[in-house]
Amino acid sequence: MKKLTIIFFFILANILGSKPAYATNSDQYLLSQAYFEDKSNSLSISQIEQKEFIPYQGALTGGYKTGTFWLKLKIAASTQPLILKIRPVFIEEIELFDSALPQQKPLVGNKYPLKASDIEAVSYNFELVSRPADRDIYLRIKSVRSYLVNAEVMPLAQYQKKDRQELLVYAAYSTLTLLIALWLLVSWVLHRELVLGIFAAQQIFAFLHTSLHGGIFKILFDDYFDPIRMNSFFSFLVVTYPFFGILANKFLLREYGLKRSFNSVFNLLLFFSALVITLNFLTNQPLTFNLNSLLVFITILFFLIASLFGVDIHQSTLKADALPINVLRIFYIFNLTLWTLAIFPLQGWLPGGELALHSLHIYSMVSGLVFFFLLQYRAKALLKIESSRAIALKSEADHERQQREEQSMLLAMLSHEIKTPLSVLKLVVDEKVSGSDLEGHANRAVNNIDFIIERCLQLGKIDAKSMQVHKITFRIDEFINSIISEFKTKNHTSLTYHDNPIVHTDQDILRIIVSNILENAIKYSPKESQIYIETRNQNVNGASGVQIQFINDVGSMGAPDPEHVFKKYYRNSSATKISGSGLGLYLVYELIQLIGGLVSYQYQHQKVIFKLWIPC
């Protein structure tokens, strides 16, 4: 960043150091200037010579007009050829009428190649022959952009020197805007932050606009691109640049809690900007560029108003802390002042001099540079905020992990301490109530407590991510038969095995999964009803595996809710009378993913269907 700052100030020093290039002594050869506006766009030179011209000094500021401007220049007597220099380069068409010339000069302007001028240079020019007496010459100027025109007359040596200095200034303008654009682009690539990305795109447009407006592109690519196409591209840049500016500032102010009504105004400005872009493609008339210029002024003014009255700091995001809103307001005031100074000569509201010719470049360079540093400050502040958040989140995660570990240790300890007396209690129950009506109830109560403890232990292992997978190869039919025998439900279970169901997975984890589904089917299906289990080989997404399907009738408790069936602690509202923890199907969902399998649930035709898929 420090190196880039040094480069910026070096370029600024070059620009300021080249100030003598703007100091002109063309008054020695250009004795007077006057203009006439041909609103009909049809007058000939003979008709123009009869018109009354309006005198002016410095640069002509005719604003955005649909007519043609004629300039009447009085050239002083000279013993050497002189060069008539005309700026800025966005003037589209210039025609010279000089009675001293043996033949008419070619047209020059942004729609014509550089070689149309007598000297290939940054500015348009005509060579004027020497004459022993003063004379009047006429320029016919036609442009769809602002009629900001500056004419100078000087000897060839002086013209060449000034052209070199001017080229250096415009190159500095372009270099500066390019460096800003590249730095913002790199920042966006590194951070992938939306506001930075939009401002980077806007600055790329600023670089292209500056290079075309200053004539750098025309010098470099005049032999490769058609001047008319290049002129059309320049027009496109002029009217598109505001769209990105509006979009970028809209997203920036949204970070500060932009109010809905002001957000709607931003959308309206974007609509008008898109309309101006469309008008440029359809008409390419002065009205388009006049509207565009006024739109930019209104937009920049609205930026300031929105920052003052259109944000709710209480609704702002964390990103707003990176760049204080008051700093942004100061920038908007500064930006509005710069654009006001730039637009007044373009609109013809103020007389213009040398500074007016560079007003757009100065605005683009200075505002871009200031906002660039603001965005860099914002990016650094965001990085600090994100780093602080990351540290806080890591600390919170570590604390949560520690809590889970402590809970898991406590649960394991309690489970161990409970299971020992529970085993003793089961022995006593078997001894004391054996053969009585209470035996079944007592054993079920003890088994329910034991089952809940087992599920809590399994849940603790999942939460602590301490459950290891140890895969072995085994037959699925033998495996399911062994589980059914444990549940003692063989008479109520229908088994169908297709193919040769062999799997390669963790047997203990799969036992927990199948046991939970089977236990769920037994508990919630009608008594003495059949539970259907079917296995078959099945490929999923190109991977081979075995599908196990469990089907049972819906009991009096109803069917599980498909949206909540695999959630932790979920139980059907009608199932509260039956002992359970709400963890069984949650464990199924978590454990099947641990071994790379899939589980799904369906309820159709009064049947509850669970499907497991285990990779081979």
Image: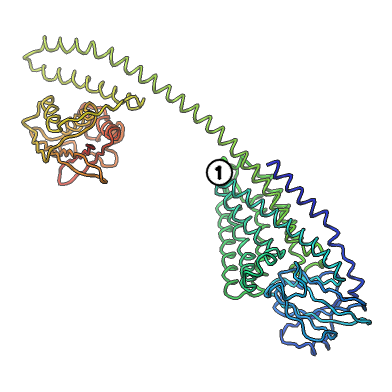
Would you identify the image quadrant in which residue 151 lies? bottom right
**Residue 253 in sight from this viewpoint:** no
Q: Report how many numbered discs are placed on residues in the image.
A: 1
User: Which quadrant is the C terminus positioned in?
Assistant: top left
Colour scheme of the picture: rainbow
Kindly indicate the quadrant of the structure image that contains residue 573: top left
Q: Secondary structure at mark 1?
A: helix
Q: Is residue 357 above or below residue 438?
A: below
Residue 386 image position (x, y, % from top left): 55, 36
Residue 332 falls left or right of residue 76: left
Decide: few, some or many residues near mark 1? Use Cα within 10 Å; few <14, some 14-19, many ≥20.
some
Relative to 63, residue 299 above or below? above
Task: Say if residue 329 shows up in the picture.
Answer: yes
Q: Residue 428, percent across and down?
A: 15, 9
Give the amino acid at mark 1.
His
* Percent of width and height locating residue 609: 18, 41
Which residue carries the number 1 mark? 191
Residue closest to the eye, 293 or 317: 293
- Residue nearer the viewer, 421 or 509: 509
Q: Is residue 420 above or below residue 30?
A: above
Q: Measuring 83% from the left and 73% from the top, which residue is drawn there?
A: 83
Residue 125 as seen in the image, left or right of residue 293: right
